[in-house]
């Protein structure tokens, strides 16, 4: 081979130079287009958000003017209305002692004050006044069971004419064409949706912030989270701004906010209530399934409402609106065991130990239930690296593809940043990072391995989940349990900048989703100085457990509660048991 073939002729050189110059120009043009497009996308993003916030701000100013009486929002009459227990509010609305318009304005005014402080509401429903006025025109014989009761609705649950944004700018100005089935059922029962509430970006966080609607803060400490993803709902209900809230739950999204805010949160069995009309970045779910849920002041409120929803009436029939929903009607015979409840209790998962305050309220609740005559037996759930990995794989079976797609051209919020970045890691990097982190990180390995390789593995994972459920049910039956008592989270509400690091603290609620067990939260006590001092003895063999310890410092006064669960389709038994447990707890703390 001659040297000529290894050299460029002058003509070749000219062509090469021209080609290189052309390629460079094309690259520069492409880069300029990309940068210009990026600037354009960002400009469009900020403009869309600004325009939407300006509109909501204007609407709130008008509503505030309409509600202000004698220079104040909350009159004595309104304060008396919002302080009524739900049962009494319903009774007075039915009798006409309180009109639907009065109840609406009382809760609008209270909610306005609360959201000014905690930023928990995204939109006030502009059609609520018209709805309340129409209800006031009805004769008493035509009033539904929830006649005139104001309700709040989580951002992601469709309300006709209003956005379901998930905290994403791309979902702004896309109002829902119809109500979610559960919302419509409640409207048919007489309820009045009056606001939508804030969520974390994409809903995939136990925090509650997004770049569109901003940060919802913890009621007792603005530096801490109120829980998520139904965080706005929990804050509004716990602060007295709504008698009933609609949330959703796929890993604790209704229960953890209730725990962190100090109210009752409830997740039914998937399929017990309709989930048609819940907006998600996922087109479908295959492993761990989401469900709509409830937030209220008391478990008796959830019990009352769920009984109404699952008892069809001619003009309010959830099963007619959603014919694919299993027709599991309310069964009153399940509300009593005919004997004292037999309750299993789990103080903590060794894989994810709880902080001293969380353990204390479990211990004290066990004592309260024993004093009330209930039978308490120790119980344990299988939970280690394999179960954590399985939950994560089944909750995001697409390996985060749709999550990352939803976040394209969006400003990334701190509440989901770690999750989003983790999902983008190449598969070959994951075992390497896991090896580098080693045993110093207890949970990182499971999170990094939570990756579904192919369709065959997807089937294997589904089988593994089914086997996990069957093992747990077999153990439950052998122990002859009615109910299970366990923590709701591993620590008190963490600071906002720590929440993404502590997602594994939600294992206690996540497992109930993977099992598809109905579960609810009861507030028991507050974090004390003694709980804080006992943090010195909290085990920290891994970096992540050290994070739990650090995040819990300064949490004095934060709510502490318990989670109660039952077997699938046993909501009647669970809610009756929760009411009895709540009474036993109240009696115990009155004595002490």
Image (cartoon, helix red, strand yellow):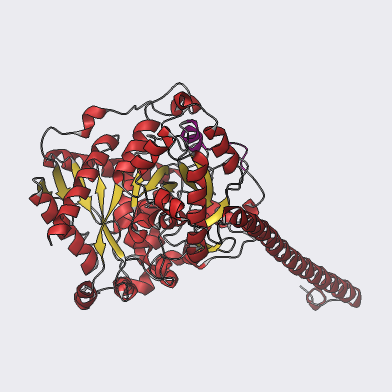
Which residue is painted at 57% across and 37% down in the image?
133
In magenta segment, residue 180 = yes
Picture coordinates of residue 215 (x, y %)?
A: 51, 65
Picture coordinates of residue 517 (x, y %)?
A: 29, 42
Q: Which contiguous range is marked in magenta?
A: 176-188
Q: Is residue 393 left or right of 587 when viewed as pictured? A: right
Which residue is painted at 49% across and 46% down in the image?
153
Picture coordinates of residue 415 (x, y %)?
A: 48, 65
Outermost residue, front side: 70
Which of the 4 image quadrants contains residue 170? bottom right
Question: From the viewer's perspective, is residue 104 above or below residue 31?
Answer: above
Confirm whether residue 98 shows in the render. yes
Q: Main secondary structure of the magenta part?
A: helix
Residue 586 vs residue 148, the one in the foreground? 148
Residue 361 vs residue 355, the one in the foreground? 361
Question: From the viewer's perspective, is residue 303 above or below residue 217?
Answer: above
Q: Is residue 408 left or right of 590 when viewed as pictured? A: right
In magenta segment, residue 34 = no
Residue 368 vs residue 114, the one in the foreground? 114
Which residue is painted at 17% across and 42% down in the image?
476
Which residue is painted at 33% across and 37% down in the image?
304
Confirm whether residue 230 shows in the render. no
Which of the 4 image quadrants contains residue 441? bottom left
Question: From the viewer's perspective, is residue 65 above or below residue 564?
Answer: below
Outermost residue, top side: 314
Q: Quadrant of the C terminus?
A: bottom left
Q: Quadrant of the N terminus?
A: bottom right
Q: Is residue 423 left or right of 550 when viewed as pictured? A: right
Picture coordinates of residue 491 (x, y %)?
A: 29, 66
Q: Is residue 73 left or right of 2 when viewed as pictured? A: left
């Amino acid at each position: 081979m001659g040297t000529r073939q290894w050299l460029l002729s002058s003509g070749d050189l000219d062509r090469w130079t021209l080609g290189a110059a052309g390629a460079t120009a094309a690259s520069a043009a492409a880069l300029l287009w990309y940068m210009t497009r990026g600037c354009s996308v960002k400009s469009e993003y900020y403009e869309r958000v600004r325009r939407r916030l300006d509109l909501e701000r204007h609407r709130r100013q008008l509503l505030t003017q309409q509600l202000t009486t004698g220079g104040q929002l909350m009159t004595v009459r309104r304060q008396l209305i919002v302080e009524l227990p739900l049962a009494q509010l319903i009774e007075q609305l039915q009798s006409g002692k309180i009109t639907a318009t009065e109840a609406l304005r009382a809760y609008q005014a209270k909610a306005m004050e609360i959201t000014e402080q905690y930023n928990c509401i995204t939109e006030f429903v502009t059609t609520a006044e018209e709805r309340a006025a129409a209800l006031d025109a009805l004769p008493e014989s035509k009033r539904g069971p929830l006649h005139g009761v104001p309700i709040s609705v989580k951002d992601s649950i469709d309300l006709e004419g209003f956005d379901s944004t998930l905290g994403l700018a791309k979902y702004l100005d896309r109002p829902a064409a119809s109500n979610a089935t559960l919302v419509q059922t409640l409207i048919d029962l007489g309820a009045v949706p009056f606001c939508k509430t804030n969520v974390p970006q994409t809903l995939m966080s136990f925090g509650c912030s997004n770049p569109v609607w901003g940060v919802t803060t913890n009621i007792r400490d603005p530096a801490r989270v109120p829980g998520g993803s139904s965080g706005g709902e929990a804050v509004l209900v716990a602060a007295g701004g709504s008698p009933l809230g609609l949330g959703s739950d796929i890993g604790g999204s209704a229960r953890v906010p209730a725990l962190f805010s100090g109210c009752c949160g409830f997740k039914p069995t998937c399929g017990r209530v309709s989930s048609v009309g819940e907006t998600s970045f996922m087109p479908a779910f295959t492993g761990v399934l989401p469900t709509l849920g409830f937030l209220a002041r008391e478990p008796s409120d959830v019990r009352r409402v769920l009984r109404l929803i699952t008892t069809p009436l001619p003009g309010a029939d959830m099963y007619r609106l959603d014919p694919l929903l299993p027709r599991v009607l309310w069964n009153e015979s399940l509300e009593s065991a005919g004997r004292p409840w037999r309750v299993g209790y789990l103080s903590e998962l060794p894989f994810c130990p709880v902080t001293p305050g969380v353990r204390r309220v479990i211990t004290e609740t066990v004592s309260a239930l024993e004093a009330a005559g209930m039978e308490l037996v120790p119980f344990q759930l299988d939970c280690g690296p394999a179960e954590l990995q399985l939950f994560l794989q089944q909750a995001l079976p697409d390996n985060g593809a749709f999550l990352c797609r939803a976040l394209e051209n969006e400003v990334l919020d701190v509440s989901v940043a770690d999750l989003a970045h983790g999902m983008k890691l190449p598969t070959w990097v994951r075992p390497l990072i896991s090896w580098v982190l080693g045993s110093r990180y207890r949970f990182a390995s499971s999170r990094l391995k939570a990756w579904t390789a192919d369709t065959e593995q997807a089937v294997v994972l589904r089988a593994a989940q089914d086997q996990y459920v069957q093992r747990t049910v077999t153990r439950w039956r052998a122990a002859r349990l009615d109910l299970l008592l366990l923590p709701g989270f591993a620590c008190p509400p963490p600071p906002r900048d720590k929440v993404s690091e502590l997602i594994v603290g939600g294992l206690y609620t996540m497992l109930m989703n993977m099992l598809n067990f109905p579960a609810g939260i009861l507030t028991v006590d507050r974090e004390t100085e003694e709980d804080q001092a006992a943090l010195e003895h909290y085990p920290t063999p891994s970096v992540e457990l050290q994070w739990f310890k650090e995040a819990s410092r300064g949490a004095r006064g934060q709510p502490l509660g318990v989670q109660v669960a039952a077997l699938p389709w046993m909501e009647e038994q669970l809610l009756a048991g929760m009411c009895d447990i709540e009474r036993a707890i109240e009696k115990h703390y009155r004595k002490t």
